[in-house]
Amino acid sequence: MTDTTVPTPERKSPAAGIVIGLLVIALVVVGVVFANKVHQLNDRIAATQGDLMNARNQAANLDAQLSQANAGSAKLQAQLDEAKAESAKLQEQLGVANAAAAKLQAQCDEAAAKSTLVLTQLDSARAEFAKLQTQRDDAMAACAKLQTECDQSMAAGAKVEAQLKEANARVADLQAKLTQALAEIARLQPKPKR
């Protein structure tokens, strides 16, 4: 029991060596880690210096662009002022155009009213024209009928005239025969005695 509970001096030495060895290893690991971190920090510093140089260059570029932008802004401001003046002028012209448009609208409304009146009159005239056309057609039909009757009358008149000429010829013939007969009767009558 005594051997296991109380450590001997020989057993102490190797444990101290192990601890020292572990400490040395830990120091080496810490040194390596620290060296790596220092190396990383140096790399970061170099990168940061590069970024700083880039940032300075970009700042210089941005400063130049800002100057250009300010110059462009002044130019755009001048153009904006000119555009505002032009817009005011156009607004005034728009007011004149609106007044003219209102006047034209009034004239257009008046013309539309006159057009409606003329259209009404035109419809009346068309109705009257249709009525007159119907009367004309009736008159032409009556005229055609009268022409037919006239043609028939003229044909009948020509027939009557021919009959009249024939009757006159007969009358003349009978007159001549009567005259001849009277002369014959007068010749045949005895002469009165004296």
Image (spheres, rainbow, N blue to C red):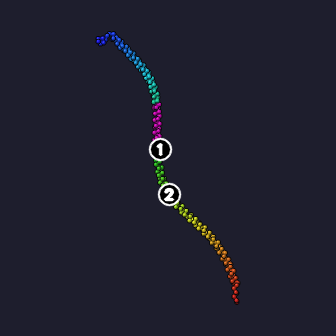
> Residue 126: x and y, percent?
51, 58
Answer whether residue 126 is visible to the viewer in this image.
yes
Label 2 crowd bin: few (<14), some (14–19), many (20+), radius 10 Å: few
Q: Tell me, yes or no, whether the two marked residues, 2 and 1, touch with CB atoms within 8 Å.
A: no
Identify which amino acid the numbered label 1 is placed on.
Gln
> Residue 127: x and y, percent?
51, 59
In the rendering, which numbered label is found on residue 187? none
Identify which amino acid the numbered label 2 is placed on.
Asp
Classify 114 as above or below 185.
above
Which tag, 2 or 1, sits closer to the chain's start? 1
Question: Is 69 part of what is drawn in magenta?
Answer: yes
**SS assignment at label 2:** helix
Task: Name the dominant secondary structure of the magenta segment.
Answer: helix
> Residue 24: x and y, percent?
38, 14
Question: Is 19 part of what is drawn in magenta?
Answer: no
Distance CA(mark 2)–CA(mark 1): 43 Å
Classify 115 as above or below 142.
above
Q: Using residue 165 as the reference point, say whether residue 104 is left or right of it.
A: left
Q: Nearer the viewer, residue 152 or 80?
A: 152
Write the start and end of the magenta stretch as one range.
67-95
Q: Using residue 13 as the reference point, say whether residue 155 is left or right of it.
A: right
Q: How many marks?
A: 2
Residue at (69, 88) in percent of width and height: 192
In the rendering, which numbered label is found on residue 93? 1
Kindly identify which residue carries mark 2: 123
Classify 11 as above or below 189.
above
Q: Between tags 2 and 1, which lies in front?
A: 2
